[in-house]
Amino acid sequence: MIYIGTTGWDSTHWNGSFYPDKTINRLEYYSNFSSFCELKSTYNKIPTENDIAFYDKNTPKRFIFTVRVPHVITQDWKELKTDSIQLFLERFKELEKKIGTYIFKFPREFEYSVANQKFLLKLLSHCRELTSAQFVVDAHRSWQLDEIKTELSAKMACLIGTDMNPLSSLVRDNSFYYLRLMGNVDENSNRVNRSILIDRSADLKYWGEHLKFLNNRVKSIFVCIDDNFSGHAVKDAYLLSKILDSNKVQYKGFQSPNAVPKRKVADKAIKI
């Protein structure tokens, strides 16, 4: 099964193009169009019990969150933050049925080494004692090794793939795959706002074919689209859903035409 969603649901520039007005409950509205979303606010802090209740109350029973692990757990890899890990994972116990994966986002300095490998495996082993969920590792390219692929798979984990670095060759059969479409990071740094839309339909057509191939190998695929990919993640999620539809691939994604932004998209970047 392929799940298509976006990184977050709270982008203010979706007002008018996706959300009908500024006062609407955005998560509840979003969940009417998609059954999956990456929860990125948890990277900055461990959510409160009220936050967890809000996530649960405003999404259907079969909605799926992928959740970024707080940076307090991943920024200092010299010491395992057992108290923070336990608090974080216990906080999500009430939402466990809606958790697809947890995402460990490490800083660029967290390069592969024997010592860092031991830390990562220790971290995963500790988390495995507290939850049965899957894990995604977002780390430096030096981790892209067959040995790491095997060890992560044994702990129900995988390396994250992106459109710049898919890592699909490192995907093990009958496992899972996490893909984040985010565009060129260096180019994104120059895009301060979202007043530019870029036509990514050709890229999405490629990914539609690629995901069709991978879907025959793995149990589940999470495709998370970032606003930086083209300027509007909802638009891309809807277009990719339509492409998978035409390819006769089973998926869960944006299935309503109302999810398409009203703003015009040209063959090249345009001002809107």
Image: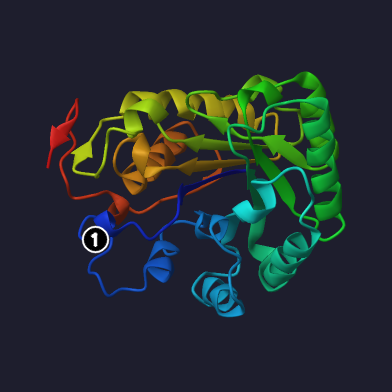
Q: Quadrant of residue 264?
A: top left
Q: Looking at the image, which residue is at 62% across and 43% down?
A: 1
How many neighbours does mark 1 have within 10 angstroms: few (below 14), some (14-19), or many (20 or more)? some
80 or 241, nearer to the observer: 80
Q: Horizontal and vertical percent for residue 206? A: 44, 23
Q: Quadrant of residue 141?
A: top right
Relative height, residue 21 to residue 156 (above, below): below
Residue indicated by mark 1:
15
68 or 266, nearer to the observer: 68
195 or 212, nearer to the observer: 195
Relative height, residue 85 to residue 184 (above, below): below
Q: Quadrant of residue 176?
A: top right
- Tell me the quarter of the image containing the C terminus: top left
Q: Using the rendered image of the protein, determine whether residue 136 is visible from the camera's viewpoint.
A: yes
Q: Looking at the image, which residue is at 60% across and 55% down?
A: 67
Q: Horizontal and vertical percent for residue 170? A: 70, 23
